[in-house]
Amino acid sequence: MFTKDIVDNAVNSADHTTLVAAVKVAGLVDTLKSPGPFTVFGQTNEAFDKRPTATVETLVKPENRETLTKILTYHVVPGRLSIAGLRKQIKEGGIPAITIPNVFPCNGVIQVVDSVLQPN
């Protein structure tokens, strides 16, 4: 049985420090520590680095919490979707490349992705 939740997994990953900071600013820690289950498309530091630095620095400011929350929650879907399950649901161009598939914390699945999606 997996005992670490989505947040614990991200906190223990050196590749997800920007995501962890953003989740804290957005006030999503309690949500992502709840039973879920959730499928999270976890953006790496490298994914955030692809965006202009000013954009990331601006997003993590408290006054931009609503926009940041919208972007982060765009990367979370209800349920446990493994790669096999995603293949059935993915529309062309629907998600970024998954670099590490099927990380299974106790409350869902993390699919590590190489870019940050921008909701419309």
Image (tube, rainbow, N blue to C red):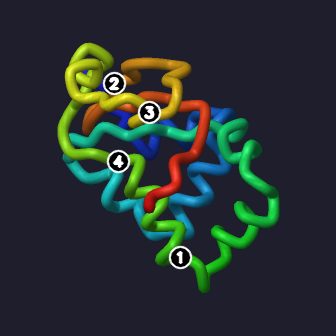
Q: Nearer the viewer, mark 3 or mark 2?
A: 3
- Please name the residue shown 33% across and 51% down the image: 33
Left of 11 or right of it: where is 59?
right
- The residue identified by callout 4 is 76
Q: In 3D space, how far apart are the residues under numbered discs 4 and 3 (Cα atoms)?
A: 17 Å
Which circle marks residue 65 in the picture? 1
Q: Position of residue 54 (x, y in %)?
A: 80, 65
- Please name the residue shown 38% across and 40% down the image: 40
Q: Position of residue 25 (x, y in %)?
A: 56, 69
Secondary element under disc 2, as helix, strand or loop, is loop
Mark 4 vs mark 3: which is more N-terminal? Answer: 4
Q: Position of residue 86 (x, y in %)?
A: 27, 24
- The residue identified by callout 2 is 104
Left of 62 or right of it: where is 38?
left
Q: Amino acid at mark 3?
A: Gly
- Above or below — where is 88 with respect to 36? above
- Please name the residue shown 51% across and 72% down the image: 67
Q: Amino acid at mark 1?
A: Arg
- Above or below — where is 47 with respect to 22? above
Of the pair 71 and 95, the residue shown nearer to us: 95
Q: Is there a contact, CB below 8 Å, between mark 1 and mark 3?
A: no
Q: Amino acid at mark 2?
A: Phe
